[in-house]
Structure formats: structure tokens, C-alpha cells
Amino acid sequence: MTGIMDIVYAEYNYWIYVALMMIGFYAMIAKKNLVKKVIGANIFQTAIFLFYISLSDITGGTAPIIVHGDHAAEVIYTNPVPHVLILTAIVVAVSTTAVALALIIRIYDEYGSLDEDVILAARRNLQPEFSEYARQKEVDT
Amino acid sequence: MIWILDISLLLFLVICAVAAITIKDLLSAVVILSAYSLIMAIVWVEMQAVDVAFTEAAVGAGVTTVLFIAALARTDGRSED
């Protein structure tokens, strides 16, 4: 029993990362508003960054900036490789957000709404040959 | 790492994430997302990832919020869910 509680306490960063990831994933799937979906994607990405930075952290480690002097041999650094990966990933996250928002503006100009159901209904009305009803009728005949 | 500060910051992150996806007004959701990014930057300073922290504070909290607000200015700011 103490083993389980030790894991829960010692690895709390990972529990929070899983919780954040699931919150973002829920927003991406269940929310109907397109901006809410992008916010969910942002939260999902940040949760993955939290996972990587938690991996690189070492108890008692300092920031990976080189130390000179007498005690230079005793200094423990945190792992800088995940930091570099995440620096790149942050920039990619901003770029994907910018593209998603540009598409959202274009969709709003076209359909006048950001609600997924309204957009899908408008698409069915614009292109009746692709609607579910027409496809079913084609199967029947 | 001060564990009580760390746990309170991480819990605040979860609260911010839940608030950002449940609130109806989209501008409020974007501002809460910006606060979430800043808290994340503080968590990263605490984890000795200073380079990631100031990139997140500038790009994640700054540029992303500006992009969202610019997009919301061209669309409507209300959400049904």
C-alpha cells in the first residue's frame, strides 16, 4: 500500500500532466465551438511540454549553464536536451495555432458561425448531393 | 524544488485549464489561457528550465493571446458550450 502512495506522491508532475492532457483532449472532441477546440489543442500541447520538462528535471540539479571555478566538478545540471526539443515545439505550437485561427476566420466569413453543428448543417444545404439523406436515397435506388 | 509551491502551481494549472474550456465568453477563455501559460512559465523556472520559461512567457502567453484576440475581433465572441 505504501508503494502505491509513494508513486502517487513522488510522481505528482506526471499525474498533473495526464490530467491536463485529458482536459485538452476532452475540449478538442466534445466542444462544439471551433475556438474552444483550438484552446483545447493548446492545453494538450502544453501538457506534453510539461511531461518533457518533468523528465529532464533532476533533484538538486541547477539550470544547464556552465559553472566555472573550484566547485565546477561537483555541479549537477538538469538535462538540456528536452529543453531544446520543447523550445522548438513551442514555436511549432504557435504556428499551428496561427494557421488554425486563420482557417477559423475564413470559416466564419463563409458560414457566419463558429458552431460545428451550424457549419455542418449549412454545408448540407449548400451541397445537397453530399448530404446523408441523399446518399441514403442513392443506396436505396 | 519547493514541493508545496510546486503542487499549488500545478493545481492552479488544472483549475485554469478547466475554467478556460468551460467558460462561455471566448475572450475570457483566452485571457484565462494566457494566465495558464504564465503559470506554466513559473513552473518551468522552478524546474530549472529557464530558456523554455522565457520562451513560453513571450511566445505562449504573449503572441498566442494576441493571435486569439485578433481572431476573435473578426468573429463573434460567444460560445454555446
Image (cartoon, coloured by chain):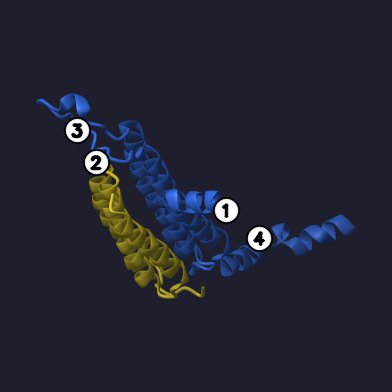
Disc 4 secondary structure class: loop
Quick one: B6 or B18, which is closer to the camera? B6
- Disc 2 crowd rating (10 Å Cα; few below 14, some 14-19, many 20+) is some
Of badges 2 and 4, nearer the viewer stands 2
Would you say the residues marked 1 and 4 are in contact, meaning their CB atoms lie under 8 Å apart?
Answer: no
Disc 1 secondary structure class: loop
The residue positioned 38% from the left and 44% from the top of the image is A54
Label 2 belongs to which residue? B51
Amino acid, disc 2: Asp
Per the model, the C-alpha gap separating discs 2 and 1 is 39 Å
Chain ID, yellow in image: B
Quick one: A72 or A53, which is closer to the camera? A72
To the question of a shared chain for discs 2 and 3, the answer is no
Q: Colour of chain A?
A: blue
Of badges 2 and 1, nearer the viewer stands 1
To the question of a shared chain for discs 1 and 4, the answer is yes
Amino acid, disc 1: Met
Q: Is residue B79 above or below residue A139?
A: below
Per the model, the C-alpha gap separating discs 2 and 3 is 10 Å
What numbered label is drawn on residue A65? 3
Q: Chain of mark 2?
A: B
Q: Chain of mark 3?
A: A
Disc 2 secondary structure class: helix
